[in-house]
Each structure stands twice: as structure tokens, then as C-alpha cells.
Image (cartoon, rainbow, N blue to C red):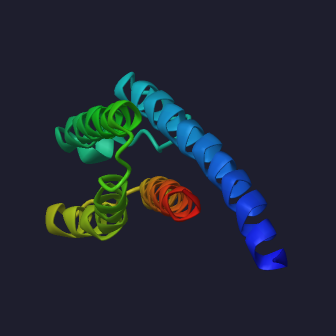
């Protein structure tokens, strides 16, 4: 009985907290990509003299990733289908290694803050998607 009570109270609370965190992560990504596209060094080191023409590649990549994350956010919000957040989160986590590989191939140092951003976004997608799916399964079991 206590287990059922805890699940009925804690799961919705954790789902709400993960939803807040996920919304903050999407807004944070939007802000970071806008500042980065404008050439600000607030979030990432502005090494445009070091990167040369590759500096635009990293900024453009971040804008495309922001657009794809926002599209996934809108799809999940409107369709109430949270399964796509799990592969999106995996994609963000895989980007951590991919950006390091990109720097190694092009022989340029990559700001490690990119990795932290990708980690935060990947985990936010996983946690929010997981809790929303678990909350949906719990509601189905109760009905």
C-alpha cells in the first residue's frame, strides 16, 4: 500500500521536475546557439582566428541542432508521444564523442563546454522521455 502511494505521488512529482528541466534545457540551447551564432564568447571560447573557416561550421552545426531539438520538442508536446526523446537523447550523447573526433580530424582544439552542453541535453531528453513514458504506463495500469 505504501509502495502504491509513493508511486502515485512521487512519479508525477519527478515527471514535473523533469519537464521543468527539459524546458529549461531547450531554452538554454536556444540562447546558447543564438549567442554562439552572434560570435559571443559567453558560452564557448571564440577562437575564430584559430578555427578560421571552421568556426562557422561549429556555429552552423549548433543552429541546426537547435532547430532539430525544437522540432522534436514540438512534436512530442503536440502528439503526447515521448518515445522519440530517447533516441534524441542518445544522439546528443553520441555528439560528445563526435565533436572530439571532428576536432581530431581537423586538428583543432574543441572547447570542452560543447561536451558538457551535449551531456546536459542528452540526459535531459532521456530523463524527461523516460519519466513521461513511465507516467503514461502507470496511468494505464491504474485505469
Which residue is painted at 47% across and 44% down in the image? 45
In the image, residue 69 lies at what x, y percent? 33, 40
Residue sitting nearer the eye, 93 or 87:
87
Q: Quadrant of the C terminus?
A: bottom right
Q: Is residue 80 above or below residue 9?
A: above
Q: Is residue 63 left or right of residue 31?
A: left
Q: Is residue 66 above or below residue 4?
A: above
Q: How many marks?
A: 0
Q: For the point 49% across and 59% down, which residue is it? A: 140
The quadrant in which the N terminus is found is: bottom right
Is 137 positioned to the left or the right of 72 in the image?
A: right
Question: Residue 129 location in percent, x, y?
Answer: 45, 56
Compare residues 21 and 46 and report the one nearer the observer: 21
Q: Residue at x 41, y 32 (%)?
A: 36
Between residue 42 and residue 98, name the one nearer to us. Answer: 98
Image quarter of residue 122: bottom left
Amino acid at each position: 500500500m505504501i509502495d502504491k502511494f509513493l508511486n502515485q505521488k512521487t512519479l508525477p512529482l519527478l515527471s514535473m521536475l523533469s519537464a521543468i528541466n527539459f524546458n529549461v534545457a531547450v531554452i538554454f540551447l536556444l540562447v546558447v546557439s543564438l549567442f554562439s551564432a552572434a560570435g559571443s564568447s559567453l558560452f564557448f571560447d571564440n577562437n575564430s582566428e584559430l578555427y578560421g573557416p571552421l568556426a562557422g561550421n561549429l556555429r552552423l552545426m549548433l543552429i541546426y541542432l537547435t532547430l532539430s531539438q525544437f522540432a522534436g520538442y514540438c512534436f512530442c508536446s503536440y502528439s503526447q508521444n515521448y518515445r522519440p526523446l530517447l533516441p534524441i537523447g542518445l544522439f546528443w550523447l553520441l555528439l560528445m564523442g563526435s565533436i572530439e573526433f571532428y576536432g581530431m580530424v581537423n586538428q583543432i582544439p574543441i572547447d570542452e563546454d560543447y561536451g558538457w552542453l551535449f551531456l546536459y541535453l542528452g540526459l535531459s531528453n532521456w530523463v524527461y522521455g523516460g519519466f513521461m513514458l513511465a507516467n503514461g504506463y502507470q496511468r494505464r495500469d491504474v485505469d
